[in-house]
Amino acid sequence: KAGVTQTPRYLIKTRGQQVTLSCSPISGHRSVSWYQQTPGQGLQFLFEYFSETQRNKGNFPGRFSGRQFSNSRSEMNVSTLELGDSALYLCASSFSVLDTQYFGPGTRLTVL
Amino acid sequence: KQEVTQIPAALSVPEGENLVLNCSFTDSAIYNLQWFRQDPGKGLTSLLLIQSSQREQTSGRLNASLDKSSGRSTLYIAASQPGDSATYLCAGSGSGGSNYKLTFGKGTLLTVNP
C-alpha cells in the first residue's frame, strides 16, 4: 500500500507570494492533518480535515488555509508569504485522527 | 491546553546499551500517545501507539509505557544500534470532542556510537 505522498518536495518562494502544497493520504484514510515544523517551535498543528470538513484549526493566522477533496486528498495554501513561514510542512493521514498517524516526507518551503 | 515535554533533549550512548526516553504531558485526559522517530530532513515514522486504556505496547526492541495518572510515558530501547540514531518524538492526542490534533514534544536527539 502506498504511503502518504506530498508534492512538491521543495519550494523556494519570495516574500509576498502565495503557495499551495498538496497531500495524498493512504488509500482509505479519511483524516488528514497538517503540521509545520521549525527548529525553534518544533511541530505545530495547523489543521485537520475529515470527509471534507475542517474539524480543528491551530493557532496560525488566516493566511494559512486548507481544504480536502472528496477523494480525501488535501491542499494547504499560504498567502502573502513571510520569511518566518520557511519550514518543513508535514501532512499525516489516518482512518480517524485518534488512530496511528502516518506522515508523508514533507514539503520544504524556503521564503526569501 | 496540552503541553508535552521530552527529557533529555539529546542523548549519546555506546552501541548495545539499553536506554529510556522520557515524555511528560500536562493534561491527563489524553486519548492516546504516539512515539515517532524522525531522521534528518525526513518525515516522521510511527513507532508505537498506546491507547489511553493500555499501559504499554511493544514492537521488537521497543517498549513504550503510558501512565496517565502521573502524566508520563517512556520509550525503552533495548540493545541500541547505530541505526537507531534519530530524533524521537512523542505526541499526545486529545480526548475527543473538537480536539482533533496531536501535541508534540520537542524531541530527544539520540546518537548511538559504534
Image (tube, coloured by chain):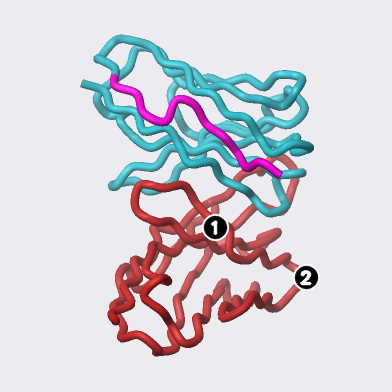
Query: Dividing the image into 4 quarters, which one contains the C terminus of chain A?
Result: top left
Q: Secondary structure at mark 2?
A: loop
Instruction: Please name the color used to draw chain A.
Output: cyan
A20 vs A82, nearest the viewer: A20
Q: Which residue shows up at 42% across the image and 31% down it?
A: A9
Label drawn at residue B53: 2
> Where is mark 1, residue-wise?
B91
Q: Which residue shows up at 73% across the image and 65% down it?
A: B51
Furthest residue in direction left, as rendered: A112
A76 vs B93, nearest the viewer: A76
Q: Which residue shows up at 67% across the image and 30% down it?
A: A49
Displayed quadrant of residue B84 = bottom left
Asked whether A8 falls inside the magenta stretch, the response is yes
Q: Marks 2 and 1: CB-CB under 8 Å?
A: no
The three-letter code of the residue at mark 2 reads Ser
Q: Secondary structure at mark 1?
A: strand
Asked whether A9 falls inside the magenta stretch, the response is yes
Chain shaded red: B
Chain of the residue under the numbered disc 1 shown in the image:
B
